[in-house]
Structures are given as C-alpha cells and as structure tokens.
Image (spheres, rainbow, N blue to C red):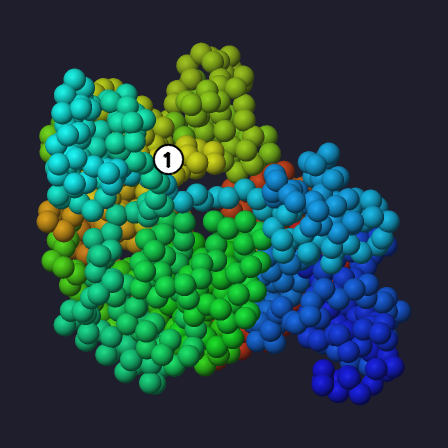
Amino acid sequence: MLEFNEISTAERHTLFIEVVLPLSISKTYTYRVPYELNNAIAVGKRVVVQFGKSKLYTAIIYKISDVPPQLYEAKYILDILDEQPIVTSLQLKLWEWMAEYYLCNIGEVMQAALPAALKLASETRIILNQSNIDKSALSDKEFLIVDALEIKSELRVSDISKLLGQKTVFPILKGLFDKGIVNILEEITQKYKPRIKSFIKLNEDYLASENLKALFEILNRAPKQQDALLAYIKLRKERAEISKSDLLEHSGCGDSALKALLDKQIFLIYNKELSRLFSEDDEELQEFELSKEQQDAFSQIEGHFNSRKVVLLHGITSSGKTQVYVRLMEKVLATGKQVLYLLPEIALTTQIIERLRKYFGSKVGVYHSKFNDNERAEVWKKVLNGDYDIILGARSSIFLPFQSLGLIIVDEEHETSFKQFDPAPRYHARDTAIYLSGIFDARVLLGSATPSLESYYNTKIGKYGLVELTERYGGVKVPEIKIVSITEETKGKTMQSHFTSVLIDQIKSAFSRKEQVILFQNRRGYTPFILCSTCGFSPKCINCDVSLTYHKTTGKLHCHYCGYRNEVLHECPACGSAHIEQKGFGTEKIEDELKLIFPEIKVSRMDLDSTRSRNSFQQLIDDFEDKKIDVMVGTQMVAKGLDFSNVSTIGIISADSMLNYPDFRAYERSFQLLSQVAGRAGRRDKQGEVIIQAYDIKNRVLHQVVNHDYNALFTSEIIERKNFNYPPFYRLIQLDVKHKNIVRLESIVKNLAAILEKQFGERILGPETPLVGRVRNYYIKTILIKVEKEGVSINKIKTALSSILRAFEPDTNNKGIVIQIDVDPY
C-alpha cells in the first residue's frame, strides 16, 4: 500500500485506486490511473469513472495501491475533479462504521452523505438556475450547454456529453455549478421558505415635530389616513418596529388609506425576514446571565465531561436549555474547536438559528433542506475549509467534513426525526453522532424534556452523565392538564360531535379572551375507512393491504402509502346495499364539525394534505401568528417546535389511538408526544390549559403526563422492557422481506427463517405479517432478531447475518426477493 507522499517519487509507476461509487453494491471497485495523473490522486478526491458498459459516475478515491485487481482488468479513470480532497480520512472512517453497523453498503452511505452537486452521474438531470446570464463570461463549451438548456428545459449529463462530443463533461458542469448557473432538477424545490413580513416606517422628512404638525393639517380632509398616522405614532412609543398588519388592526383604516400614504411617500414599507416562531427568551440571548439552577447545570455538565464523553441534560420544557448550550459552545470555541448542533426539525426551529447568529455572528453555518443543491455544496466546502465554527443542522449534517469537532449537541434527542427509515443507510443521527464524537475525541450533550428510555437508562448505569433542570426559566408556569372521559360524556349526552363539554367550554373561554386554540388529532383525512353496514365490505387500496381514507377536500378515497385514489362509494360493490357508513374521524372531519359548532370563528388545518403546496406551510404559520386563524387543527406537525404567544388552550381529541398502537414503544412515544403538545399552551404571564379526551381515563401514561412525571414512566416501562427482551437490554435487527408473489414470498421467507434459526436459535421472531402486509404491490414479511447485550458480540452476529444474506439473495430459487435490513428499528 502506498501513501500519497510516496507517489511523487514514482511518476511512471502504475497505480491503482479503489473507489467508492454512489451505488448499492457490496464492494469497492479498482481502477487504473494514467501515468500523467499519478501525482494528482489522493484519498478523498473525486474521480470520473465508467461503470458498466456506458454509465459514468463521480466516485471517491478510497485507497491507493500498486496492486491490480485479480478478477478483472481495471479500467482507466477518466478524470480527476478536485485539486484538494473533498472527503476527509475521518469521514471515510465514519462511512466504514455506518456501513458495518447498519449493515448497508458504503456506496449507500456515500449517496446519503454527499450533496447531489458533488456526485454527478450520466443520468443526472440538469436545469438552468439563472434566468439572466452574461454569456460573454462563458467558455465556448459552457455557452453551448446554457444555449441548449434555454431551448430544452432539462438535459441529462449523457445528453450534454453527446452535445459536446466528449466522454466526460463533469469538470465543465462543475464550473457551471460553482458559478450558480445550473442546478440539479430533483434538488431545486425548496421545502422551506423564510417568513417575510412587511413593516411600516415614517418618512424621515416628517420626523421633526413641526413637519409632523404640518402633515396632520395636510391630511385634515383624509380622516382615515389621519387615523393611520395617529395609530403609527402611538405604536411607535410601544415598539421598535411596526408591522403592516398591526398598523391596519390598531388604526381601523383599510388597505386603501394605507396605500394612499405609501403612494404619497409619507409612509415607507420594507420587508424583513422573521422567525416563524414565538420564543419568550429571544431577547435574553444577546446579553444574559445564567440563573443559579442553570449555572449549577453548566458546572455539572463540565464535571461529567471530565470522565464521560456523553451527558444527558434532562430539562423540562422552557427550562432554558439553550442558554446552557450557548455557554458550553463559548467554552469549546475558545479552544479553537468546532460545534455541531443537531436539531430534529430544522425548518421549524429557525429562531435558534437567528439567536445563535446574533450571538456568534457569521461563524454559524446552517445545513438543511432549506438550501438548494449549490448552496449545500457551498456549505460543504466552507466546513472543509474551516470557515464555520458552529454548524446547525438536521440529521444529514453529521456527514459534513469537520476538521476539529469539540462538542456535539443533540437537541430533543428523543425525536424519531433523527432516525432515517428509507432508503439505506437506516441510521440514527444521535447514535451516529456519538460514534463521530469518538473519532474527534469530542463531547456529546443530549438534551430533552422527555428523553428516550435508552438514553435515560444509560445514565442510570453510569454510561452517560445526567444533569437535570427542574424549574422553568423566567417563572413560566407549567400548563394545567385535565383528563376528560369520552365514555361518561357520551352516556350523559353532553358530547357535541367529537368534543366533550369541557373542551367546548374551554374553547369558548379562550375565544372570549381573544386567545387561540390548537386541537390535536393524530390522523389525517376525513374518515379513516368506509364500511357497508349490510355485509361489512370496506374499500381497500389495489396496491397495498390498507383501507382507503375518505378525504372531503378531494371527494375521493386515498391510500396514504402509495397515493392511489378511487371514487367514493354510493353503493356496496359486494352486495349492492346503499347503507354505506363512515367510520372514525381525522383532522378534516374535526375541522368541518368545529366550523358547524363555531360558525363565527376561523378554523384551519395543518397536516400533510394541507401543506403539500410550496408555500402552504409557511402561510399557515404566518396566518396563525398574525391571529388570522382562531383554531388550528393538526396532526403531529403542530406538536413539533411551534410556539405561539397567544395560544392558551390545547385540546387532544382522542388520546387512545396513540396509547393502543401495537408497538413496544407506544407508551413512551405517547408520553413524549402528549407532553410536547401540552407544551404549546400558555405564556409567561398566564397558565395554559390542556384538555385530554380519552375513553381509558385510568391509563397510567395519561396521569404521568398530567403530573409531568417522567420518572414514573421510566420506572414502569423499563421493567416491561426487561421482562420481554426489548431495548435497552436487547438489540433489535429487523428484516423486511418483500416479493410481488405472496406464495413465493411465504416459501422463501420460511426457508430464510429456518436458516437464521439454525444460526441464531431463539433470538429469531417470525416471520410475521406486519400491520400493513402489502405496499406498492410488494407483499411483506418481517423477521425480528433480538440480541442480548450481555455476553454476546453484536459484531459477530452481524457478520454471520451478512454472510447468510450474501449467500441467500443471489440464489436463483430466491429470484425477485428484496430484503431490507434495519438495525435499531423504531
């Protein structure tokens, strides 16, 4: 094996490189290096290679040697794209670990890790990113590409290769990417747009008192314009900036009066990017002192870091965890090291970004789906060059090329958003971050009000340090939570539709105080399924084994797994009966029926269906914050990261659906979600109200939520986990075996289970049919492997499993089978 610094002394020596291709293949491939490129190669650089008969890919140099492959003749690399490596040796170490731990291929890790602009392939589609381009600044070949893209909206890399008459065009496209002229088609849709709000200010010419007096005389014949001016002067005494909506509300004048003042340039309008979210302690991050409890927590964390690499900060909601994070970051930055701040839903937590940028300035970088592909590639390069001291990001930011990580903060570490479910690698960002910290000898701080049982258990056995914040920052009151029996109110005939009398009264009370309400129902659509009351027929998806959900907005039946739609039934196709009933209820029905009970109020819905269009999510949040919406009905989306100053009441329509879900984590997840939803209620100066409607009002989890008693949840859950061999005492590996023919699937999966049982014995559960046994015409069987943590090497188990699957899948008897491996599922 040759090191790079040895290569320069052997320019005419034949060199070979192993490369990682962004494909799901089980090994790296070896290519030959032309003599003239010997001195240009280095581990971590991108090269252009031909794979197969005609396809070109960007690959990463993984190893360099002078040993040719034994089983095939090595092809020559076609080009080198980088002057300096874009992937570090430490990143490659992380990729290797992820491939080994999560039982996937290193090419799948590369595919997830690199921004699309850094991994072009011959089938990649290119689109223009700019409408006005100075073509005089382009080379002849760049000019041809831009000209062709103006005629045809998109081109594949292979099309551009034919256009220019040369095999590799990646360096030319790289130049156009770097200039921001072209982009990748599938990457250009921005999932998130910043919130822009209009503000009004008085023209400086009228600031002097004598000019202002003259202005009132000029507007003497325009009373509405005078009202607007008076309202502006009054509001200016109370706040630094006055929004257009606030001025219209306080003045009582209409848009026409304000437009007239703008046309006369008495008022000037300007736009400003704002956080979507309300935060009580925005202003406290500029200059703040830690409270005594926060200072104690800070000192304890530092103490734990002397002996442990991971610390869990268990702080109740609004306890001021962010200020503690900031003080820790300051200390790490002073040593010249970097900080990674992981957030589960970065598009919903922009106030963190703004607050940290105010505090730390331009050294804060952000990496998430808000950016287009060119911008993500730019952040990648800036991190590589050490231009950022702090990176805030979603789970994919663990892949960035850090130089000297000193601290990783995983905020809301319990969130399921940190787990990647599809495609491979099916990694968990929290666990991967802990391994990443080991590479850099960094420290990890996990933060949560409702920690995962695994993390909390690790504190109990001394693996992690534990620090607790038990008081809310600034005297914020914990919301009052009430449980209301749906059964009792149904018997007493006090229910109105799906709302108990207690919830109705609480909503009325909130409206009387001009406060807002959030209602949570963890199911979208109008009704979950339709049933023939005569024969019991229920329409199902033609591609998946799941009932179709009725959506009133489209007037159709929808499949939430594959997108299939069908017309609503008016008579049963099985027996011809016209007695078709709607069963259950989703967010659409809650919204609809609330409008009937309160026709005078504005109700909106936030779920996957209502936020599909480009700006719909942003518009909903803006309208709710501007008090244009009285009640927001939503699914889990309303529980994550959204805090509004005027929300006093939260209603949970049906808690039972979560509690009764067939999953060993059901109680844990219910506690976390209910606690999150409850945390949306109330302000610093007023206690919020939370109403939980349920049939099983004696369920222990509900009372643990009411009492904010995480320790009681942990104590009861950990006993069951131990009794039934679940994490944190056992590790889980789930195999989803899929085939389009159910008979073939059952035969193949039975054989696979027998082989696994022979190797692993009673650790094998299944095969079983999951809750949804067919998705997109693939039938599914699940095999679960439970591996005890004590006395068994998980690496040996994984090695044996990989060996079995490598031999099993290529077998001609198993043709058409698809096996998906999920390590640490759920």
Q: Position of residue 826 (x, y in %)?
A: 45, 56
Report the front residue among 485 and 753: 485
Q: Position of residue 650 (x, y in %)?
A: 21, 40
Question: 10 Å neighbourhood of mark 1: few (<14), some, or many (≥20)?
Answer: some
Left or right position of 678 against 194: left
Q: Is residue 550 above or below residue 131?
A: above
Instruction: State which quadrant residue 53 falls in.
Output: bottom right
Q: Position of residue 462 (x, y in %)?
A: 32, 79
The residue that label 1 is drawn on is: 619
Image label count: 1
Q: Is residue 549 above or below residue 734?
A: above
Q: Quadrant of the N terminus?
A: bottom right
Left or right position of 337 against 748: left
Q: Amino acid at mark 1?
A: Gln
Q: Does residue 714 appear anywhere in the picture?
A: no
Instruction: State which quadrant residue 326 falls in.
Output: bottom left
Left or right position of 236 against 623: left
Residue drawn at (12%, 53%) of the image:
477
Q: Secondary structure at mark 1?
A: helix
Q: Does residue 580 appear anywhere in the picture?
A: yes
Report the front residue among 289 and 346: 289
Residue drawn at (24%, 52%) of the image:
279
Residue drawn at (56%, 36%) of the image:
562
Residue drawn at (12%, 43%) of the image:
237
Q: Is residue 635 above or below residue 799?
A: above
Left or right position of 44 against 422: right
